[in-house]
Amino acid sequence: MTLDELEAIIATRAKASPEDSWTAKLLAQGRDKVAEKLGEEAIETVIEAVKGNKAGLTSEAADLLFHLLVVLYANEVSISDVMAELERRQSRSGIAEKASRQN
């Protein structure tokens, strides 16, 4: 599965009934709750990485990617927008790119 395919699945599930779809239920709670859920998944991903738990990290990383795409959907940002930004940044080193954002 690609991130584009997952984005399409999220868009479809977002239109479903909140009784039938976790995605729709989460989105119905508003952007704050969607962002909070992403934060929870990020913390769980970090914990599994620190523990060195490969299976746990894999599972939590999947949750993190899913919930990131839900946050993007809730804010009308596409994965292609994110990929374009990454491509734009690719032309210079990470150190130079980060320094340019601090100004």
Image (cartoon, rainbow, N blue to C red):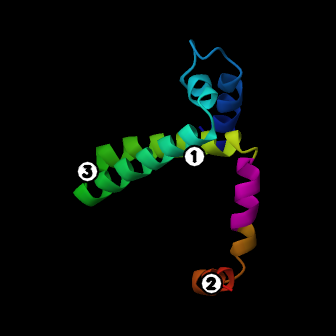
Q: Residue flagged by tag 3: what amino acid is it?
A: Asn
Q: Residue flagged by tag 2: what amino acid is it?
A: Ser
71 w.r.t. 23: above or below? below
Location of residue 22 in the rendering, given as x and y in whole percent from the top left corner: 54, 23
Q: Residue at x 62, y 84 (%)?
A: 93
Q: Residue flagged by tag 1: what amino acid is it?
A: Leu
Say whether disc 3 or disc 1 marks the residue closer to the N-terminus.
Answer: 3
Q: CA distance from mark 3 to mark 2?
A: 31 Å
Viewer-proximal residue among 84 and 1: 84
The C terminus lies in which quarter of the figure? Answer: bottom right
Q: Are marks 2 and 1 in contact (CB under 8 Å)?
A: no
Residue 38 visible here: yes
Say whether disc 2 or disc 1 marks the residue closer to the N-terminus.
Answer: 1
Name the image quarter holding residue 85.
bottom right
The N terminus lies in which quarter of the figure? Answer: top right
Tag 1 residue: 68
Q: Which mark is residue 93?
A: 2
Location of residue 79 in the rendering, given as x and y in whole percent from the top left corner: 70, 49
Say whether disc 3 or disc 2 marks the residue closer to the N-terminus.
Answer: 3
Q: Residue at x 27, y 60 (%)?
A: 50
Q: Badge 1 local density, few (<14 within 10 Å), some, or many (20+)? A: many
Q: Is residue 8 left or right of residue 38?
A: right
SS under mark 3: loop
68 w.r.t. 33: above or below? below
Q: Residue at x 71, y 33 (%)?
A: 8
Tag 3 residue: 53
Q: Nearer the viewer, mark 2 or mark 1?
A: 1
Q: Is residue 78 left or right of residue 28?
A: right
Q: Is residue 53 left or right of residue 76?
A: left
Give the magenta-colored segment's residue range: 77-86
